[in-house]
Image: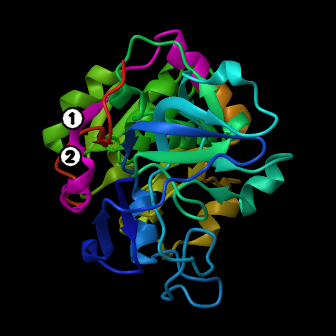
Amino acid sequence: MRAVLLTGFGGPEKLEYREDVPTPQAGPGEVRIRVAATAINNTDIWTREGAYGSPEDPTSTAGWRREPLAFPRIQGADVVGRIDQVGAGVPRSRLGERVIVDPMLYTGGERELVDTEYLGSERDGGFAEFTTVPAGNAHAVESPLSDAELATFPTAYATAMRMLNRADVRDGETVVVTGASGGVGSALIQLATLRGARVVAVTSAAKRERALKLGAHAAVDRNSPDLAAELGPVDVVADVVAGPAFPQLLRVLAPLGRYVVAGGIAGPLVETDLRTIYLRQLQLIGSSFGTHEDFAQLLGHVERGELTPLLAGTHPLRELREAQRTFTAKDFFGKLVITVAEQA
């Protein structure tokens, strides 16, 4: 089959397009999916770069579980396609089913999520013609959206859902969203608005209007010299950027406010004044991928047509290197998707 192999930690040159990769077979309790579309995520880039470090050495190369990866690996977590093979114990009635994949490969409760396998990281994913997943991770989906549009949802929106659930964002609260033009940031705007929150987006001046059209009540230039003064006291900061702005983002929070973080695009190592945290009784909340429950909640929004897919562009499978270069340039709003095969 056609696939792109990640051959080791490094730059885009570590991505190798091949047409002779063995086709996987569905094992017991699994389904095989003929892939139609798979979105690109920050996790793909950071995994390729080995950018997660280790608890002992933040500069070391490792996968998202902060441990070595096995190579070669087929990346790509956000899979949409049709089931074309079922393993033992899976009803044959699922053959031909259009599915969207929950990429978190764990069983049990949310504590298991911390050490889970992630599709495209610890297990081969969707930058290929076929991939296999546990049957329970392949969700039948009823939607008029295209395959590429559906592929914009899984990781980014489930991550955003997890952040909002972890921070217990409620109707009437004000939420600051950083990185508002990216996949998770734009998902946060929509999902927070759906639950009745007032959203203030932090983004570039060029992308301000897009954030407002998505539902943000206000937008602030990320290059503002004094974010804290412009944003004012808020209930929650949902951050995927971190970096030098971190101290200002904490000062934005009202007493008893919550700061929830799921990324560090501008730099994961930060400094702050702990007195800001304990004197204002702030909560700092770590969040990463969504649980199965978060994914089910997200899928309900998708099937009810309550979310706008932000498909910024598509690339064919053989152009994954170029697509990742475009992704890292961040000169787009929403998600970039790799199209593998056209599906009805």
Residue 296 visible at all: yes
Instruction: Identify the residue shown where x is 39% and y is 42%.
Output: 38
Instruction: Identify the residue shown where x is 57% and y is 77%.
Output: 70
Q: Position of residue 167 (x, y in %)?
A: 66, 41
- Count residues near mark 1 (Cα–Cα under 10 Å), then give few for <14, some for 14-19, many for 20+: many
Query: What amino acid type is highlighted by mark number 1?
Result: Arg
**What label sits on residue 208 in the rendered view?**
1
Q: Nearer the viewer, residue 180 or 150?
A: 150
Mark 2–mark 1 Cα distance, whole angstroms, equals 6 Å
Q: Residue furthest left?
A: 206
**What label sits on residue 161 in the rendered view?**
none
- Please provide the residue range marked out in magenta: 299-326
Which residue lies under the disc numbered 2? Answer: 204
Q: Quadrant of residue 189?
A: top left
Q: Position of residue 340 (x, y in %)?
A: 32, 41
User: 18 above or below 232?
Assistant: below
Q: Position of residue 29 (x, y in %)?
A: 77, 41
Q: At numbered mark 2, what does the secondary structure look like: helix, strand or loop?
A: loop
Q: At numbered mark 1, what does the secondary structure look like: helix, strand or loop?
A: helix
